[in-house]
Each structure stands twice: as structure tokens, then as C-alpha cells.
Amino acid sequence: MLLASVEYARPGSVDEALSLLAANPNARALAGGQTLVNVMKARIAAPDVLVDLNGIPELREIRETGEGLELGPMVTYTQLARSEEVLGSRPILAEVAARIADVQVRNRGTLGGNLCSNDPTNHLPPVLVAVGATMAIAGASGVRLVPAEEFFLGVYLTAVGPGELLTGISVPRRQGDDGFASVTIGTDGTCIVNAAASRNGSLRVVLGCVAATPVLIELPTADEEAVRAAVAGAELDPPSDIHAPAAYRRQLAGVLAARAVRQANGAA
Amino acid sequence: MSALVAKKTISVEVNGTTYEREVEARRLLVHFIRDDLDLTGTHVGCDTGNCGACSVIVDGTLLKSCMMLAIQADGASIETVEGLGADGELSGLQQAFGEHHALQCGYCTPGMLMSAKALLDENPEPTEGEIRRAIQGNICRCTGYVNIVEAIAAASEAGS
């Protein structure tokens, strides 16, 4: 498939990228391209301008502070999977990133792209809500911080508005333990349902693929039966599609939430 | 300030040779390699980033060339399947594919070879599990993968 005509820029800094996005209302940021290029091939989206972020090194950094990780949005899944800092500070990110798709996709696909595309079947939105991450969004008026719980607004829709750019993701250092479970189409394929869990005294369970955005359930204890009951009580209304009917997704949600919690309890 | 361009003359090194060509911003890397450079070893399979037949190595990184714009490869060094052998001789990896009947129709083969090369460049003695994971992004409809995995294992044992 051929793309429609488009203009292209490769800024060397965040400020340049923001100027380009502000000056061109129908511009899209190009990160790893593993979603956007396909979308453009199918003519589902037709941006006039592509702002390639691959020439901005500061967006690809991983830093470990005393409190946790500072991750650039252009960090690739491969980088996440192999990073000493990530493996030391919040290994669930590396573990999940290592199981996304395949080598080629992981070498280009980015953390920021996974978050900002916010396909309901993506892996990382539920994980980042579970670990209580904070997103930094830059725009003309400066940088604002949005907690992960408030970042995902709808299908393909996040708190990053026109002319803005996700410039950083802060992940707190692991205190308790984390878990992730999914049923996918083929090994490491698209998720049919996924669930992330984070236990730190109390428990956060986040379900993916069952609604437009990740569904957060908070519980005082990490007891698997309580988790299943809470998921059943959440009255989920997941979509039916070619991969699974709604009832199966609803059932899987409870099963996978329990599996993720089991891993977070250290028993997986 | 980075200019907004609809087309650009890019300079790309492919298998050791530098090419300068004007490309539209919308041109996919796979079409640039196949149609602008006449290197048709890299294949278009699914065109959606699933099958891996378009796999090439760019600046040491294995990726699917149908999922990248040619203009993004300006200044890059690319390895395609045509660069595997030397002086008309097949590489050890290519020979192993032949000896182990790791291809039938051959359509997935260039992508499989590039994924295998990327693996062995980084991990010269992979386990079977590591080999299988390394070709996870390459779909073969003919062979059932067993011979491909054996060929890559054999190539790694022979030090290719």
C-alpha cells in the first residue's frame, strides 16, 4: 500500500518539535512507526505533516533517580527489556516489553507510542496505571504532569492534546511486587485481555482490552478470591469482536486479574 | 530549524555501496530498496508489518522495512540479503539453509536470513529457544519452521 502525500520534518529538539506541531494542525508525531505507518497505509489517518521524533536523543534516555525511573517516550521496547536501570528499579516494565510482538517491532516500537496510541489492546497502559506512573506533557505553555490514571481518555485518545508532546514518564521505584498476565493471539501477539497488578500493602489491579481505557480496581488486600469477586462486581462491558465475544473477555478478566495478582504475590 | 519537505535527496549506504536518490517523504523504505535501488531480494509480503519478509538491518538494528519511511534512513547503513554472501559465494548461513532444506517457495527466506544474521551477530551460540524467539517476527507458510531453526543452529555451530 502506498501512503498519501505528506510533508516530513526531523527536528533536533523538543522545542523544534513543539513548534512544528503547533504550526501544522494536521501534523502527527512519528515515533517508532509500528502503528502510525500502518494507519497511514490504510488511509485511516492522513496527516499532512509527520514530525519524526527519532532525531531527538534526549527523548530516548533512561535515568534512574533515587525515587524511580525517568523514561523518555522514544525508549524502544528492546531498550526497556534490556535496561539495567529498568531491571533494577521496576522489572515488570522490562518483562512486559520483552513480550510485545517480535524483535523487529520491539527494535522500533516505543514506550511513548504505545501509551499515546492507546489502542485498548496495548500492553503498557494497564502496566503504567498499575505502577502509578506520571506522564509529563510539554506544550506551548510549558510542561504539565498527568498521573497515569488520568492520562488515558478514550480509544486512541490521551491527555496529550494538539500541539503537545509526551516528553517523559516517571515510574516510582518498586516497593512491593508487580504482576502481568495476558491471553494473546499467538505467542506474544495482540492481547485479547490483559491485566496488570501492583501490590504495595494495598493492591491495584488494572484491566486492559475490556473497555475504551484501562479499568483500575483498588483493593485493600491481595487475596485472589477477593480480586475475582471485585472484577465480577465491576460489571464490565467489553467489546465482542472476531477474536473473542464479550462474555469470554469478561471471564478472562477475572482469570487474568487473579494470575497477575498471583505473580505480584510472588507465587506465579 | 528542521525544514518541512515533501521530498529529499537522501544518502544511504546499502551493503557497503552508497546511493544518493531523491525520495518522496511518503516512500516506504521497502519500496526504495526494491524499486529505486533494484535490490529485489527484500520482499513485500503482508505490507502490514506482520510477516517479516521485508526485514533488513539498519545501523545494526533488525527492522521491518515496510514499516519505515525511506527518508528516515537518510545517512544510515543498511544490510539486505544481497549483502550476505561475498564474491558470488553463499554465506555460511545461506549454505546452511540450503543444506537443511530451510526454504521451499523462498518468499520468507530473505527476511528469515536477516533475522538469523541479526541473532548470530549478537548471540553467536543461541539456544533453540533463542533461535525461535529471534524469528518470531518472520512468518513461513511452507516449511513449518523446523528446518529453518535447524539451519540457523547448524550455522551457529559452524561459526557462521
Image (spheres, rainbow, N blue to C red):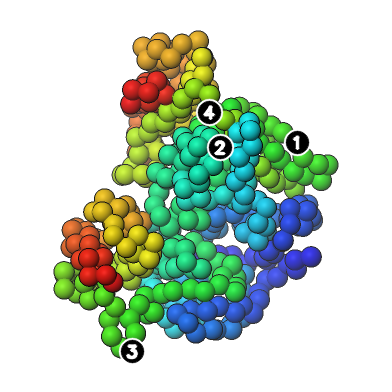
Q: Are marks 2 and 3 on the same chain?
A: no
Q: Which residue is at the far front?
A: A66
- The residue to which callout 4 is attached is A174
Where disc 3 sits, the SS reads: loop
Check disc 1 and give the amino acid type.
Arg
Where disc 1 sits, the SS reads: strand
- Name the spot of residue A91 as percent of width and height, x first: 47, 36
Check disc 3 and give the amino acid type.
Asp
Q: Distance between the residues labelled 3 and 4?
A: 54 Å
- The residue to which callout 1 is attached is A144
Is residue A241 toward the left or the right of residue A154 in the image? left
The crowd level at tag 3 (other Cα within 10 Å; few <14, some 14-19, many 20+) is few
Identify the subunit bearing mark 3: B
Check disc 2 and give the amino acid type.
Val
Where disc 4 sits, the SS reads: loop
Q: Disc 1 or 4, which lies upstream in sequence?
A: 1
Instruction: Identify the residue at image location x=44%, y=74%.
Output: B79
Q: Disc 2 or 1, which lies upstream in sequence?
A: 1
The crowd level at tag 2 (other Cα within 10 Å; few <14, some 14-19, many 20+) is some
Image quarter (top left, top right, bottom left or bottom right) of the C terminus of chain B:
bottom left
Q: Nearer the viewer, residue B75 or A188?
A: B75
The quarter holding residue B136 reads: bottom left
